[in-house]
Each structure stands twice: as structure tokens, then as C-alpha cells.
Amino acid sequence: MGRKNKIALWITSLILSLIILFVLGGSIYLIDFSLCPAHNKGRDYTLQYAIMRGRYPWMVSWLDSLQHVKALRDTFVVMSNVEKGLLSDDSTRLHALIIEAPRKTPRTAVLVPGYTDNAVDMLHFACFYNQEMRMNVLIPDLHANGKSGGTVMQMGWNDRHDVLRWAAIADLLFKDDTTGHARIVIHGWSMGGATTMNVSGEDTPAYIKCFIEDCGYTSVWDEFSYELDRMFGLSDFPLLYSASALSKAGYGWSFGEASPLRQVAKCRKPMLFIHGGNDTFVPTRMIYPLYAAKPAPKEMVVFHGSTHARSFKDHRSHYSRWVKAFLLKYL
């Protein structure tokens, strides 16, 4: 091999090595940025209580009364990581808030928080269900959020196993004396909406009666693709492909398989789809293929003018009417 050819080969190898290092480094950064965020506000319960009191002043007296009589109960369970598909055989300690109905009832709402949220972020919904609907409420902190253990976000995919476990606990706590079971609706927003849809595609027990998803995404791949373009101006290839492969190798699931769109196609129980009409975080357009993929029974409402996870805040009366009418039929 001539000297020129050796130099050309060396330069080509160097360029290829730099490209591989760039892709690998970018993929690791993408996973760390999205699945292990340093900005996880949900770890700070004190901060979230202050935010919620300021954002939803109409629920403050209800919240104060619960805290005064110690009716806002912390509950912890240990969840096997093997049971929910994680590669580690360690177990994770998970946390939830539990609120009993004013009078004994099997009707129970399991409320699922969003990305970097904790159970406190769902207290406005809890107030609606507990005060207006006179229902029991259970709000879990998802894996790596709030007071739950774990360090890596599951983006609603492996979280579906945790929510099913929490629903089983709610069934034991709030079972009807006659039937021996609770009657449960699972209601989540943002990543919690995606989690709710992921749960719906499983073989769910009979005590889970229906689902409400608010501003969930079609798949982790679709959401990350959208954010990669919106925040960094980058296309899917090569970073999203390589990051998804690293997630599969390290955490047991890829961005493509974490698909609420595929899960709702398997769901035969009733679901209410909700989205804000001006959502630019999980774009409003995602609700339409989700609704189309779900077999009946199903309902859909888009609250015009609302941004991400703000439909209830902006349209509380209208939102409440939709939820009440849905639950009157199916819970």
C-alpha cells in the first residue's frame, strides 16, 4: 500500500472514529437528559405543595383539612424489578398518597402523574374526585419520581406494571362488602396519560372499569423525535436510533416498543381521550391517531386554547362535566 493510500485510510478511520464517538456521546447525553434528568422537580415535595397551592387556590381549604386530620396518607410498597421487566434483580420502594372518600364506597380513582411530577401534582384532580365525586383516591409516585425509588425514568412503559400493582392495592383497600372488589378508574396526564394507555393494553382485572388519558403521547419514540427536532433542530438519525438501542441494552426497553398507540389498540374497556388544543409539548395532533386506534367504547374532547396539561385548570367546569358524564356511564 502506497504512502498516499495509507494516509487516506488513516484519515478515513479517524473520521469514522470521530463520528462513532459523536453518536455514542450524543446518545448517552440524550438518555441522561431524558431518562435521568437533573431538573427532576418532582423530588421536592415542599416545592410542589407551594406551587399547587398557588396554582389551584380553590383546593387549598380541602387540602388543609386533610392535612389537619392526617387524612392524606403516605403508603410505601416494594416492587420487584424482575416482575416488571427491568434487567436489575433489585427491588424498588415505591410511594403513593391515599385519600379515603367521605363515606365508604368502592368507587376509586388511581391518578397517574406526568414527567418529573409527583403525587402532589395531581391533588387538584384528587380534590375533584374526593370532594365532588365522593370517591377514594390513590396517587402513586412513578419510578424515579417523588418519594419513590429508582434513578431512571420509565416513560410510562415499565410504569404500567407499577400502576397495575397500585390498582390491586386500591382494590384491597376499598373493596365493596358485597362484591369483594373496588370499582376503579385510572386517570393520568402527560407521561401519566401514556402510562394509563399502556396499562389499558394489558390483561386488566375486572375491577378496573375504565380509563381517562389527558395529553399522553403516541410513543416514546414519537415524543423524543418531536422534542429532538423542537429543542435541538436534529433529525431522528442517528441519535434516536442509537439512544433507543442503548436503552434496550441498559434498561430492557426501546423507545419504539414503548407505544401507547399499540397498547390502546388492544383495549376493550372504555376510555376518554383529552388534550389541550394548543399543546406544544405533547403536540395536540397525537390525540387523533390514539383515538382512531382505540376500539369502542371511547370518547374524545379537545379543549381549545389550552397548553400542555392545562385543560383542567383552564376549563374546570367543562372538563368536570365530561369526566362526570363518562364515569356515570362506565363506573
Image (cartoon, grey):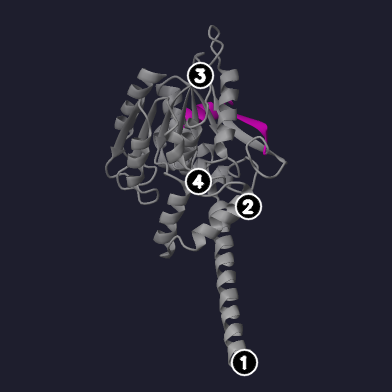
Q: Of the residues shown, which amino acid type is indicated by label 4?
A: Tyr
* C-alpha distance separating marks 3 and 4: 28 Å
Task: Tell me: residue 178, above or below residue 251.
Answer: above
Q: Position of residue 98 (x, y in %)?
A: 56, 27
Q: Nearer the viewer, mark 1 or mark 3?
A: 1
The N terminus, quarter of image? bottom right
* C-alpha distance separating marks 1 and 3: 75 Å
Q: Nearer the viewer, mark 3 or mark 2?
A: 2
Q: Of the residues shown, which amino acid type is indicated by label 3?
A: Ala
Mark 3 in CB contact with mark 2 (< 8 angstroms): no
Taking the magenta stretch, the answer to whether it contains residue 69 is yes
Taking the magenta stretch, the answer to whether it contains residue 247 is no
In the visual, does 224 lie left or right of 76? Answer: left
Q: Position of residue 96 (x, y in %)?
A: 59, 32
Which residue does the numbered mark 4 point to in the structure image?
Answer: 115
Task: Tell me: residue 150, above or below residue 1.
Answer: above
Question: Which element carries disc 4, helix, strand or loop?
Answer: loop
Which residue does the numbered mark 1 point to in the structure image?
Answer: 2
Q: Position of residue 301 (x, y in %)?
A: 30, 34
Q: Which is more N-terminal, label 4 or label 2?
A: 4
Question: Which element carries disc 2, helix, strand or loop?
Answer: helix
Closer to us: 47 or 318: 318
Q: Which residues are magenta?
A: 60-81
Closer to us: 266 or 134: 266
